[in-house]
Image (cartoon, coloured by chain):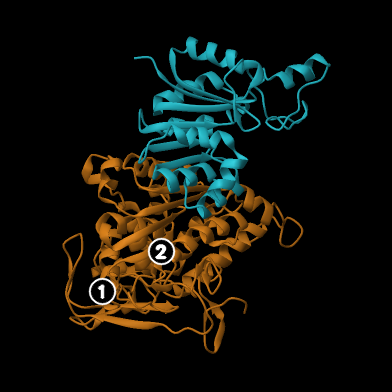
Chain colours: A cyan, B orange
Amino acid sequence: MNTSIIEARPDFAAIAAWIPQGSSVLDLGCGDGSLLRYLRETREVRGYGVEISDANIAACVANKVNVIQNDLESGIADFENESFDFVILSQTLQATRHTEALMKEIVRVGREGIVSFPNFGYWKNRLQVMFGNMPVSDEMPYQWYDTPNVHLCTLDDFEILCSHQHLSILGRHVMANGSDVNLLPNLRGSTAVYRVRRDT
Amino acid sequence: MDNSVGIVSAKRAVFDTPFTFKSGAILPRYELMYETYGNLNVDHSNAILICHALSGYHHVAGYYAGDEKNIGWWDNMVGPGKPVDTNKFFVIGLNNLGGCHGSTGPSSINPDTGKPYGASFPVVTVDDWVAAQARLADLFEINQFAAVLGGSLGGMQAMQWALTYPERVRHVLAIACAPHLTAQNIAFNDVARSAILTDPDFHSGDFYQHGVVPTRGLRLARMLGHITYLSDDAMADKFGRELRGGKLNFSFDIEFQIESYLRYQGDKFAAYFDANTYLLMTKALDYFDPARDLGGDLNRAFAAAKAKFLVVSFTTDWRFSPERSHEIVHALLHNKLDVSYAEIASQHGHDSFLMEDEQYFAVMRNYLNNVAEECAP
């Protein structure tokens, strides 16, 4: 199953690559626990997820993943300072309401934060807007009227936020169609994973 | 009956070693009633202990021969193919010390006096129960339970297992539970106790000799309890303002359906439950506070625990609210223990933990399936 998860979610492989064996990990909005399970099986991480959906809670439990049922934006307050090596927010940033506050919480609870999100600046998205419509893509498969995404951003935008919040970007992995993108990432990348930490 | 463990019978374990209560009181000899379902595996690693709450007892699942309607109190949860799957687990239910279903309690005869213990029965705590349960486990040569689970006061016992016997329990399932009662909760218990203590038929706990039962007090205590176990919404849904006779009678007789229901529940309970046991159970609830001797620091209280935890709460449970479960989860996280927490959207207040609910049962089933996998030889 490990390979299929990585194929389905290329950002998982990028996230896992940054996580050393035996780390502690908090996955905010952990879904059915696939990433935590993958990290447990391949990295022996000690992990917890925070998740709101009933179906996902039952799925996490079935996946032998520790999961706390709570809204991830209010639920993270329960976690102590630097109680995890990594706090992961995978493909969820764009759907959070208090994005700024959550970013601060991520680097409070985790020694490092790992954040992945769809790049709104991807050329296919730009093209759709240019032709007069809101973008609909694999990463953002919603119509404007039913999307949970309220805070979409480009790579540049995200990096500006990090700078405002005094976060160092320790790593960045940009992808499109499952392949790495190094040239003109803000234009050619559809998904990005960042590794951040508070400036010391 | 579908997925029932079928006909079961209660058994009696006799303990001749003296039992010292937390209070210092000593019982030289005592008995515990219990039932078991399923089979203990070769290495005795598949045992589950079910701890009961205020009014529960050893009859957890199945039914008695010739009394098919007397179904165990958690039969929806325990049985072949059910979340606590008796095809996989060896399940023990018992009646706690101080109970009134056959285990030694206030209504049992004190061999020293030839009369019921009554008021002289020691005040029993959750710690005491867990210690007594451990002796029962010893009888079966169960060194470590696969899981200990319970709801409400039963959940407190399950948690206490992880604190008193960290090596003897692999999983704790604490349902509709709290790390200690709030002042409001103690207040409810005190009103219930006052109803019993002030009943003229109570005779300071020694009513047995007078051939009477403090029915009025017990009934009031149960009525009050019932109000707090249900949610406002559940009561509104079930009874609303419906009148039994369809019209106002301008009297103090039973008029609203809720009055009829509460009195029925009160009468039913008072007919079989022992008043002294009720006092003991509520006192055990009030006293439970594993952080008490640690300056109220629950994080330190759980430092000894090694078990993995499943904590479950119900959204409409205002007597053991989700916030109280958050406190437990917080302390477990602090101690880097494995924990999952599910907050079940349910209509039925505190009583939800006894009701069948798709999400609740899915979580329990998935969790216990994994526990069963670990037990497989």
Q: Where is residue A118 in the image (x, y as percent from the top left)?
A: 63, 26
Q: Position of residue A45 (x, y in %)?
A: 39, 42
Q: Which chain carries label 1?
A: B
Discs 2, 1: same chain: yes
As drawn, the label of residue B275 is: none
Asked which secondary structure carries label 1, the reply is helix
Q: For residue A197, what is the image quadrant?
A: top left
Q: For residue A134, what is the image quadrant?
A: top right
Seen at 45% across and 60% down, the residue is B221
Seen at 45% across and 66% down, the residue is B372
Using the rendered image of the protein, determine whether residue B370 is visible from the camera's viewpoint: yes
Query: Depth check: B267 or B140 in front?
Result: B140
Indicate which disc, 2 or 1, sits on the residue closer to the N terminus: 1
Using the rendered image of the protein, determine whether residue B321 is visible from the camera's viewpoint: no
Query: Depth check: B217 or B103 in front?
Result: B103
As drawn, the residue found furthest toward the bottom would be B66
Instruction: Read off the residue under disc 2.
Output: B374
Q: Position of residue A40 (x, y in %)?
A: 43, 46
Seen at 61% across and 63% down, the residue is B261
Seen at 30% across and 70% down, the residue is B97
Q: What residue type is labelled 2?
A: Glu
Q: Which chain carries label 2?
A: B
Asked which secondary structure carries label 2, the reply is helix
Please say if B22 is above or below A85: below
Instruction: Read off the residue under disc 1.
Output: B138
Cα distance in 3D space between marks 2 and 1: 21 Å
- Residue A72 located left or right of residue B98: right
